[in-house]
Amino acid sequence: MSLSQGELVALAYGVVFAFVLFYVAIIAAKLARLERDTADLVELAIRDRPGVGADAVEAPDYAGASWEGSTEARPE
């Protein structure tokens, strides 16, 4: 079986597309896990503050926040 040049190019593009799609899926899964872990850490930090109950303070949502050029202090 012999493939034409057009078929080989299409096959090569398909393979590259599959690898890029796989890479994006892996990065998205890692990002979701990182966001979950960050939310858990924020919740633990707020809950463990002395003199502050878990219901007294609501955890801020830092997901997607951009601190570049911002005038407010970056949370530590």
Image (cartoon, rainbow, N blue to C red):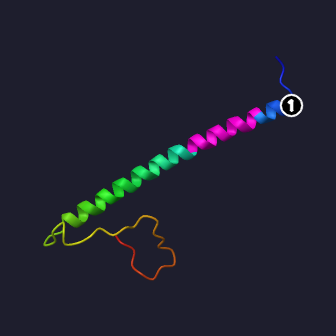
- Which is the main secondary structure of the residues drawn in magenta? helix
The residue that disc 1 covers is 5
> Residue 30, image x and y in percent?
45, 48
Assign the C terminus to one quadrant of the image: bottom left
On screen, 2 above or below 27? above
Please say whether residue 40 is one of the residues in the magenta stretch. Answer: no
Residue closer to the observer: 71 or 54: 54
Q: Quadrant of residue 14?
A: top right
Please say whether residue 16 is one of the residues in the magenta stretch. Answer: yes
> Residue 18, image x and y in percent?
64, 38
Residue closer to the observer: 6 or 38: 6
Residue placed furthest toward the top: 1
Q: Is residue 36 left or right of residue 19?
A: left
Residue placed furthest toward the bottom: 71
Q: Which residues are magenta?
A: 11-23
> Residue 45, image x and y in percent?
24, 64
Assign the N terminus to one quadrant of the image: top right
Residue ID at (46%, 65%) = 64
How dense is the environment of label 1, judged by Cα within 10 Å: few (below 14), some, or many (20 and up)?
Answer: few
Residue closer to the observer: 57 or 44: 57
Residue type at tag 1: Gln
